Image (spheres, helix red, strand yellow):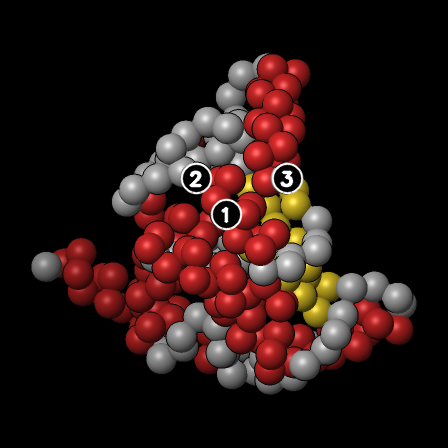
Amino acid sequence: MRASVLSLLFLLFLSQLINSQSFDPPLFCFEDAFLLSKNCTFEEQVKLLKNLEYDGIELEGLDNYEEKLADFARANNVNLALYPHSRFWLEKVGDSVRLIQKADRDNLGAVFRLCHFLKTDTRDSLELKLVKSIPCLSAVSINGADDGNTRDMEWTRLIQPLGEGSFDVLNMLRLLKINNYKGPVGLQCYDIKGDPALFLKTSITAWARYLKEMQ
């Protein structure tokens, strides 16, 4: 009981801390408040944001911010791509697409990241959401992975050398080709154990096989 009361008081304190902060530029940087708290867990962050009625993507204070970034980048001949990442503010490719469509800037795109989609989104919707996102995609990131109840899997199962795991990466590449995706495809290698010379060779061999099978 005491622990529950202390947690509630902590969340109330942190919500006041966030609401009392001013931000320049006008971007709500919740991480600042959480760092000031010293001991706020991810679960407490999620609970707090929900209590404050933020949906994690359309945060008050972010209006037109992606447009400003894109316009600044254009002035310097730079294209931007929104990069979804599990447990970050921007987690899903669908959120990237929504922001891109809202911003309406031709130098602003999205990245489809297989491992983070499998970790954060609904596995059964992957093919549909991939195809729907193609008009907005600037890049695609792939790797070997296991299929199934992927949101409950550890990263060691969601990021493997290309060609390993039960997930059908070739089918994903075929969908991209059929739907006229013309952008780059990158390889995700984060925290793969072993000798890079060996697992990169495995991935290169699998990539060559995929290209041959798609001809």
Left or right: residue 65 compared with residue 3: right
Query: Which circle marks residue 172 in the picture?
Result: 1
Q: Residue furthest front?
A: 215
Residue marked by disc 3: 215
Q: Amino acid at mark 3?
A: Gln
Q: Quadrant of the C terminus?
A: top right
Residues tagged 1 and 3 counted as in contact (Cβ below 8 A): no
Query: Which circle marks residue 168 in the picture?
Result: 2
Q: Position of residue 70 (x, y in %)?
A: 75, 73
First along the sequence among labels 1 and 3: 1
**Closer to the eye: label 1 or 3:** 3
Left or right: residue 94 compared with residue 111: left
Q: Hey, which quadrant is residue 212 in on the image?
A: top right
Q: Mark 1 to mark 3: distance in Å?
A: 15 Å
User: How crowded is the residue under tag 1: few (<14 C-alpha within 10 Å), some, or many (20+)?
Assistant: some
Given residues 72 and 173, the one toward you in this image is 173
Which residue corresponds to the image point at 28% horizontal and 45% vertical from the top-left?
A: 149
Q: Examine the rendered structure and indicate whether residue 192 appears above or below residue 32.
A: above
Q: Quadrant of the N terminus?
A: bottom left
Q: Amino acid at mark 2?
A: Asp
Provide the secondary structure element on which disc 3 rests.
loop
Left or right: residue 16 compared with residue 101: left
Which residue corresponds to the image point at 34% horizontal and 69% vertical from the top-left?
A: 48
Given residues 11 and 182, the one toward you in this image is 182
Q: Amino acid at mark 1?
A: Met
Given residues 164 and 159, the one toward you in this image is 164
Q: Position of residue 65 (x, y in %)?
A: 66, 78
Provide the secondary structure element on which disc 2 rests.
loop
